[in-house]
Image (cartoon, rainbow, N blue to C red):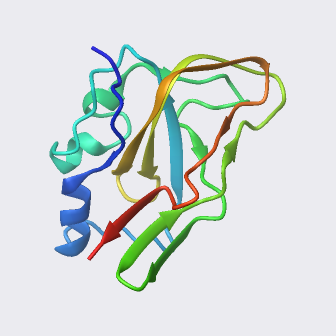
Amino acid sequence: MAFGTSSKMFVATIEAVLEQTAAIDTNSDSFKIALFNDTITAPDATVALANTAYGAGVWAANEVSDGAEWPATGQALDSVTSAIASNVWTFDAANEVSDGTSATLADVRGCLIYDDTVSDYGLCFLSFGGANAVTDGTFTVQFSGSGICTITV
């Protein structure tokens, strides 16, 4: 089954934050981005909290990595921000670039953004809309100008 074309936040993660059953702090926790290929089972935004986590559920296999250039378990997000303006909460970070200039990554279809501080719980997954690759170069994930994810209340 394919990664799919949807990008979504995990319902269980939002619930855990609001009900304070998981101590996820988008202002101070460390977040990572892990890359996945198209043999992953299509992600589901409504899975239980445990299955949002890196290394669990559909995130237990089919990760794309390249040693030190884009390590297994993903790369740390840089310049993470969590802010509210008017009635919109936005989670964002700087575009993520491979750690070197000789990355080789194939069939990258999407990513998992997860909290590396609290049980590796997933915040959201992002579809890249198709296959992406780099051979002996730099791989960049460019986030939307509107942020990685938002909630409007």
Q: Quadrant of the C terminus?
A: bottom left
Residue 99 in the image: state x and y as whole percent.
Answer: 76, 38
* Nearest to the observer: residue 131 or residue 117: 131
Which residue occupies 82% across, 23% down? 102
Q: Please identify the residue farthest to the bottom as the structure is shown.
A: 86
Residue 11 figure quarter: bottom left
User: Is 69 left, or right, of 145 in this rendering?
Assistant: right
What residue do we see at 25% from left, 31% from top? 57
> Is residue 52 rendered to the left or right of residue 111?
left
In depth, the one of 89 and 63 nearer the eye is 89
- At a point 35% along the width and 82% down the height, the residue shown is 87
Q: Count numbered badges in the picture.
A: 0
**Quarter of the N terminus within the rendering:** top left
Q: Residue at x 27, y 21 (%)?
A: 41
User: Which of the pair 105/29 is nearer the observer?
Assistant: 105
- Percent across and percent down for residue 54 are 38, 39
Is 48 drawn above or below residue 38 in the view shown? Answer: below
Task: Classify 23 as above or below 105.
Answer: below
